[in-house]
Image (spheres, rainbow, N blue to C red):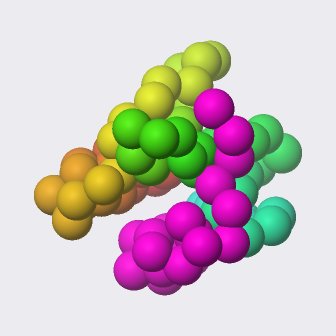
Amino acid sequence: MKHAGTCALDGLEPILRELRCISTLREKSRGVFYRRSKAFLHFHEDPSGLYADVRVGNEFDRYPVNSRAQQEFVLNLVKKNCP
């Protein structure tokens, strides 16, 4: 599964804007967010859809972000894990 390209990230711009507002996250490159010095969230594209990899604890968990409801779920998860 490859990292999300420009076209895929264009479709995720609404969630990207919201993620950029979380003060504990830093966007190192478009769609790749770090928390402190560790990678925290990035996106992948696959024929089955778009996914967000979010660091929960020491590991990344993958979540679909193909609908607004899925994006809201990921956004809430990120906010919960980024005090």
Magenta-span inclusion, residue 4: yes
- Asked if residue 60 lies left or right of residue 64, the reply is right
Image location of residue 5, percent across then percent down: 68, 62
Residue at image location 80% in from the left, 67% down from the top: 29
Residue at image location 54% in from the left, 78% down from the top: 10
- Asked if residue 42 lies left or right of residue 26, the reply is left
Image location of residue 73, percent across then percent down: 24, 49
- Residue 15 versus residue 77: which sits nearer the camera? 15
Residue at image location 35% in from the left, 52% down from the top: 65
Image location of residue 47, percent across then percent down: 47, 41
Image location of residue 34, percent across then percent down: 72, 52
Instruction: Tell me if residue 77 comes above or below residue 59 in the rendering.
Output: below
The region drawn magenta spans: 1-23
One can see residue 42 in this view: no
Hey, which residue is sitting farthest front in the picture? 47
Magenta-span inclusion, residue 77: no
Instruction: Tell me if residue 72 comes above or below residue 43 in the rendering.
Output: below
| Location of residue 32 by image quarter | bottom right
- Residue 32 versus residue 82: which sits nearer the camera? 32
Residue at image location 82% in from the left, 64% down from the top: 28
Hey, which residue is sitting farthest left in the picture? 69
Q: What quarter of the picture does the N terminus occupy?
A: top right
Instruction: Tell me if residue 34 comes above or below residue 22 in the rendering.
Output: above
- Asked if residue 41 lies left or right of residue 22, the reply is right
One can see residue 27 in this view: yes
